[in-house]
Image (cartoon, helix red, strand yellow):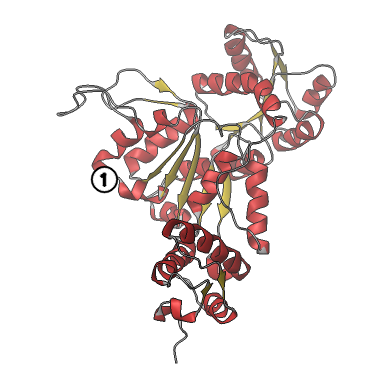
Amino acid sequence: MKQTLPLLVVDDESNIRRILQVAFEKAGLVVLTAGSGEEAMAILQQQSFGAIITDVTMPGMTGFELHAKVAERWPETPVIIMTAFGTIPQAVAAIRLGAFEFITKPFDLDSLKKIVLAAMNEKLPKKAASTKSKSPTKTTFIAESPVMKDVLQTIEQVADSRCTVLITGESGTGKEVVARLLHELSPRAGQSFVAASCAAIPESLMESELFGYEKGAFTGANNSKPGRFELAHEGTLFLDEIGDVPPLIQVKLLRVLQEREFERLGATSPTKVDVRLITATNRDLQSMVDEGTYRLDLLYRLKVIEIPLPPLRERIEDIHPMVRHYLAKYGEENGRALREVSASALAMLESYSWPGNVRELSNVIERAIVLARRDEDVLDMHHLPNALRPAA
């Protein structure tokens, strides 16, 4: 594939610069090198580049500082950061600020080639996509409270990126709603949104469900079957309850994120895939890492962007608009006329702790709609379950 712009490699170690220069010249790229951030900036003043690879730890200007300057002056140029394991948290922060990718040393040369070529090939399409007007979203996202307005702002900021997103929060807070909104606001909105709950997939079937299998891979595999990753190709894959993924699948997920390829069960060659991965959990993954049950490198890959969702009890301002939304939705579905909520019923709803969060509120309103008489048009206290009433 013809590239019109060269690659810039920045590293204070001459042997690393030489290895990368030879490797990428064999791949058909024009390669320039710099031994420091300051030298790289001087070169950047003279010409444009299709991508930049930079080490982090260098005398003088660090790779992070170089990335910040490039992002400010040449924001369209992808920057790939090479980092030691100990600086992965800082590299994740750099990704949040716009770096294209980070790789750990010692790096795999083939993997780095794929990342660089993807960066150079995505440069123009991503720029074109950013100027395209977005279609109206299908997902209803209610954000009247300050905390949820902040969440919405984060969603809008990261939706058109390719980075992974980890959505955290208690059960029922609306994590899939956020995932769908991220998809609908992204350049992938016209492609598939595939959702799966890792907790609902038996451990023995998880590999074949996520990655598919070939005919004859096991007894009963009479035909080949694509997995969720293939079904989401060029779209978005949402994996809920990502904390329930067993160690073997954690390794395979890490490979997909690093290599953008995987092997079907029973396959002898890899399948390449272009998927934006969004995950969610109500568990503390860092505690699982500390306990040795979850991979730290996978956690860093999953939470390039983390979006924490507060429980409903911490966003009381959202309850009234949510109630109106569910009254309209379930009223239409069930042929009922309830359209508003009385002040006393609203006070009861707003004082309840909502252990089941938005999902519980939705169920309460649906129950009220179904039990209401057809001539009633206001949701009142007698429509609500006794569990919502304060203890005497």
Q: Residue type at mark 1? A: Pro
Q: Residue furthest left?
A: 219
- Which residue: 80% across, 24% down? 39
Q: Quadrant of residue 147?
A: bottom right
Task: Say which of 12 and 78 sits in front.
Answer: 78
Q: Residues within 10 Å of mark 1 (few under 14, many from 20)?
A: few
| 207 with respect to 325 (left or right) | left
Quadrant where the image shows the N terminus: top right
Q: Is residue 160 above or below residue 225?
A: below
Task: Say which of 111 and 316 sits in front.
Answer: 316
Task: Say which of 340 and 226 sits in front.
Answer: 340
Task: Assign a secondary structure to mark 1.
Answer: loop
Q: Is residue 19 above or below residue 98?
A: above
Give the image location of residue 284, x and y in percent. Answer: 46, 57
Q: Is residue 40 visible?
A: yes
Give the image location of residue 117, x and y in percent. Answer: 59, 18
Q: Quadrant of residue 83?
A: top right
- Which residue: 78% across, 28% down? 74
Mark count: 1
Give the image location of residue 245, x and y in percent. Answer: 36, 45
Q: Which residue is mark 1?
A: 202
Q: Residue furthest front?
A: 375
